[in-house]
Amino acid sequence: MIEINASELVIVAQLLLSSILGGAIGFVRERDKKAAGLRTHTLVCVGSTLLMMISIFMSVKFPGSDAGRIAAQVVTGIGFLGAGTILHAGGAIKGLTTAASIWVASAIGLAVGCGFYTAAIACTLIVLIIIEVLHKVEQRYIREKDL
């Protein structure tokens, strides 16, 4: 029989929380038929969580190592992933919100990975409000006047 200790349960719980938070953002993007949806946001969030946990583990196992180094590279890598979602077509730029949502999903994952749960949950709720409410505000008050 496999025995799981308390620290291993925390690891699993962190990864599950990350998948839920990233999945919530991805669900909204998927529902709106955006290029990056449920799977992408969930994978980015969970992957960022795991990389943050590895970074912290490495700094404990190898004193003097830089715990922020992996996290910094995650931010850079996600920037490239997000850049791939931005398109310039017919004088319009599309995909900026998708790129930003991928970037913030990564930040949420990093927060979960270092145990900053309240901030990760609060950020997810704020992101969902921004995506839902500000989209409606833009449609009603900004884009309507541009036509």
Image (spheres, rainbow, N blue to C red):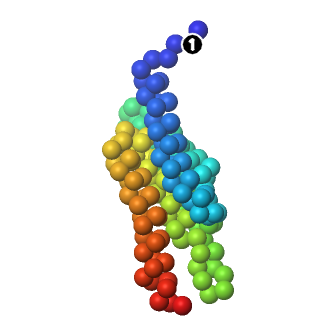
In the rendered view, tell whether residue 58 sits above or below residue 28: above
Looking at the rendering, in which quadrant would you find the N terminus? top right
Residue 78, x across and y down, in percent: 54, 57
Residue 61 lies left or right of residue 86; in this view the side is left
Residue 66, x across and y down, in percent: 40, 44
Q: Nearer the viewer, residue 108 or 121?
A: 121
Q: Nearer the viewer, residue 92 or 145?
A: 145
Q: According to the image, label 1 marks what residue? A: 2
Graded by Cα atoms within 10 Å as few (under 14), some (14 to 19) or many (20 or more), the crowding at tag 1 reads few
Tell how many labels.
1
The amino acid marked with disc number 1 is: Ile
Looking at the rendering, in which quadrant would you find the C terminus? bottom right
At x 60% / y 83%, what residue is drawn? Answer: 92
In the rendered view, tell whether residue 10 sits above or below residue 39: above
Q: Nearer the viewer, residue 28 or 140?
A: 140
For this orientation, the residue located farthest to the right is 90
In the rendered view, tell whether residue 10 sits above or below residue 124: above
Label 1 SS = loop
